[in-house]
Image (tube, rainbow, N blue to C red):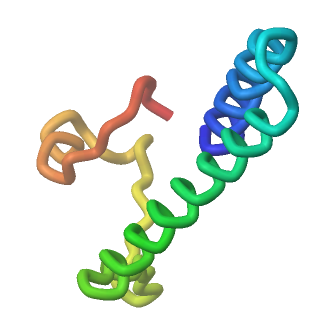
Amino acid sequence: AAFANYRMWESLGFVIAFAYSTYICLSIKIYICLSVLALTMVTYLYVEYNEYKNPTSSVTYDMEKSEKADFKEMNEKELNEKNVVAQTRL
């Protein structure tokens, strides 16, 4: 999803640059690119600062507490108690 989102915005940038390429001279295009670069740098630093101040918790997996569900042996009541979400019964 992240890669598709990146490609979408990259393509949109190409379309916008192509659309205004015949109407604006080179020096103005360079100023536009530098402005967008500065804006992205500032917003990136803002996100990094917020992540530093409020770190997200790491995802851990406890091997001792993990349970493997045997769906063939479980009845409907046990499935509801364990909060198992599945599209089909295995």
**Which x, y percent locates residue 80?**
15, 41
Q: Quadrant of residue 41?
A: bottom right
**Which x, y percent locates residue 84?**
29, 45
With respect to residue 15, does 38 lie above or below?
below
**Which x, y percent locates residue 13?**
71, 28
Q: Which of 61 and 15 lies nearest the eye of the viewer?
A: 15
Q: Which of 86 and 35 lies nearest the eye of the viewer?
A: 35
Q: Which of 71 and 3 lies nearest the eye of the viewer?
A: 3
Q: Which quadrant is the N terminus positioned in? A: top right
Residue visible at 24% across and 81% down? 54
Q: Quadrant of residue 21?
A: top right
Q: Quadrant of residue 3?
A: top right
Q: Which of 77 and 29 lies nearest the eye of the viewer?
A: 29
With respect to residue 48, does 87 lie above or below?
above
Left or right side of 68 for 19: right
Left or right side of 20 for 75: left
Residue visible at 80% across and 24% down? 14
Residue visible at 36% across and 80% down? 49
Left or right side of 39 for 36: right
**Which x, y percent locates residue 44?**
50, 65
Residue visible at 40% across and 89% down? 64
Left or right side of 66 for 28: right
* Total count of labels: 0
